[in-house]
Image: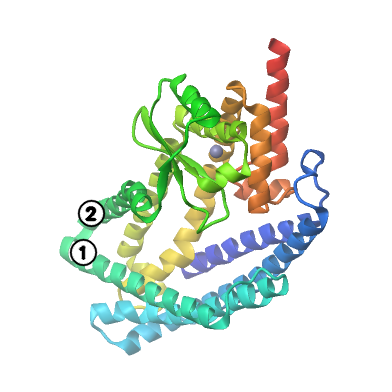
């Protein structure tokens, strides 16, 4: 049992290691023809070097973290901490996460320090001074203590109270939290941002025509003042059913012309027409169910705890196995499925924009967005297959051009 657990943790690390090595190797791949004009070559080369340093640092720290985790598990250190802390169920539960948090704080801080203060500094991207860095770290530590402590205490209380009925209760609780966040998001965005109605003109007319031609009612088109907070341009639909409010970031108006903006929304409408968000939501639900099921196995797995030197169930240790073992493993497997579905949905949504007559404009819009994100223009095939939720830009442009050609062939 112990061996299987440790083997899975090691396998997850090896998987990440392979991805990182492939990523490093792909750094010198040439930029594909269709996307050569996006960045100036010097900036792109500098950015690739920056990414390479980041991946290397990441590799080092992941190796260190995995080594420490395996060592602590292999030597049953967690059981000894739990025994030293005392017998009461809550104390025993908090002793093991305490060690976890200590290790995580030391290695996590070192990782963040190297990333922000060394690598980003070297390339001139760093805007964080040392005091702010320390403040951010303390904040995130306090948040972890509160979150882990709170959730664990809640779970233990519920488990003692409900016994095995806890599975549906905890799953329902998690879903309720997720749904509340989803429902409240537009509300929060409404109160924390300034909105203005989009002025009359070409853009408004075209957006309305696009939506109404597919049976949607446009309630209003709002421009959100996002430029104070982010340089990224974005836009989304809000509202349930066929009545939509269209929200544009004000950056979008500066970065793209009217047709390009309409093209972005034609793509988003494509997602809506194919119910892509709903389907991905369904897959996320499956993810939650898988995690909850494994929690149940963990809670009932008596021999598992004995294998690591505990006398009975230890909730804190169950939490550790959840974060070290179950979540990374489920994450990788589900990620493969979700990403493959998402990439297909992206091509289909691009196709919608082409069908509406905005194919060429969409290419322009995608290039602008890629420039903002500093997207990798030539990622390795394997990396795309395993980890990309969106197809690489060059592939999307090629597909759009193919569809444009097919259209012009028909007429
Ligand atoms: Zn999309």
The picture quadrant where one finds residue 155 is bottom left
In this view, which residue lies farthest toward the left?
161
Reading the image, the residue beneath label 1 is 158
The picture quadrant where one finds residue 82 is bottom left
Pointer 2: residues within 10 angstroms few (<14), some, or many (20+)?
A: some
Q: In terms of depth relative to the viewer, which is nearer, 339 or 76?
A: 339
Q: Is residue 89 above or below residue 384?
A: below
For residue 135, the mark is none
How far from the left and from the top, in percent, is residue 326? 45, 60
Is the shortest distance between ligand 1 and the CB of mark 1 under 8 Å?
no
Callout 2 secondary element: helix
How far from the left and from the top, in percent, is residue 408? 71, 16
Ligand 1 is located in which of the four quadrants? Answer: top right
Q: Is residue 382 above or below residue 15?
A: above
Q: In terms of depth relative to the viewer, which is nearer, 343 or 70?
A: 343
How far from the left and from the top, in percent, is residue 153? 26, 71
Q: Is residue 391 above or below residue 108?
A: above
Q: Looking at the image, do the residues carrying marks 1 and 2 touch, with CB atoms under 8 Å apart?
A: yes
Residue at 77% in and 58% down = 43
Relative to 90, is 16 on the left or the right?
right
Reading the image, the residue beneath label 2 is 169
- In primary-sequence order, the first of circles 1 and 2 is 1
Residue 254 visible in the picture: yes
């Amino acid at each position: 049992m112990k061996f299987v657990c440790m083997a899975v943790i090691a396998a997850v690390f090896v998987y990440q290691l392979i991805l990182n090595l492939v990523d490093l190797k792909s750094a010198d791949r040439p930029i594909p023809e269709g996307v050569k004009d996006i960045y100036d070559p010097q900036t792109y080369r500098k950015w690739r070097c920056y990414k390479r340093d980041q991946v290397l640092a990441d590799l080092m720290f992941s190796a260190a973290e995995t080594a420490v985790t395996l060592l602590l598990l292999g030597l049953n250190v967690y059981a000894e901490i739990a025994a030293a802390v005392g017998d009461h169920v809550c104390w025993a539960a908090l002793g093991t996460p305490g060690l976890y948090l200590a290790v995580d704080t030391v290695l996590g801080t070192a990782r963040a320090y190297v990333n922000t203060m060394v690598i980003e500094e070297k390339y001139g991207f760093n805007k964080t001074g040392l005091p702010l860095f320390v403040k951010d770290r303390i904040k995130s530590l306090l948040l972890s203590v509160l979150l882990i402590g709170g959730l664990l205490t809640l779970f233990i209380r519920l488990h003692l109270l409900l016994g095995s009925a806890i599975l549906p209760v905890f799953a329902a609780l998690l879903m309720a939290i997720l749904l509340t966040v989803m429902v409240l998001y537009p509300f929060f965005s409404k109160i924390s941002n300034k909105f203005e109605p989009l002025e009359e003109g070409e853009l408004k007319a075209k957006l309305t025509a696009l939506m109404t031609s597919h049976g949607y009612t446009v309630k209003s088109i709002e421009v959100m003042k996002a430029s104070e907070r982010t340089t990224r341009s974005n836009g989304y639909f809000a509202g349930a059913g066929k009545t939509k409010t269209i929200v544009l970031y004000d950056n979008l108006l500066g970065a793209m012309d009217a047709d390009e903006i309409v093209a972005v929304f034609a793509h988003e409408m494509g997602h809506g027409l194919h119910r892509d968000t709903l389907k991905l939501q369904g897959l996320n639900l499956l993810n939650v169910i898988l995690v909850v099921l494994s929690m149940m196995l963990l809670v009932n797995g008596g021999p598992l705890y004995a294998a690591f030197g505990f006398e009975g169930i230890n909730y804190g240790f169950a939490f550790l196995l959840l974060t070290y073992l179950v979540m990374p493993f489920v994450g990788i497997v589900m990620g493969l499925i979700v990403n493959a579905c998402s990439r297909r949905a992206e091509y289909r949504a691009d196709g919608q924009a082409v069908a509406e007559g905005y194919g060429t404009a969409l290419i322009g819009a995608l290039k602008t967005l890629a420039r903002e994100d500093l997207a990798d223009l030539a990622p390795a095939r394997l990396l795309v297959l395993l980890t990309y939720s969106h197809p690489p830009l060059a592939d999307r442009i090629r597909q759009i051009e193919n569809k444009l050609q097919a259209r012009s062939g028909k007429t």
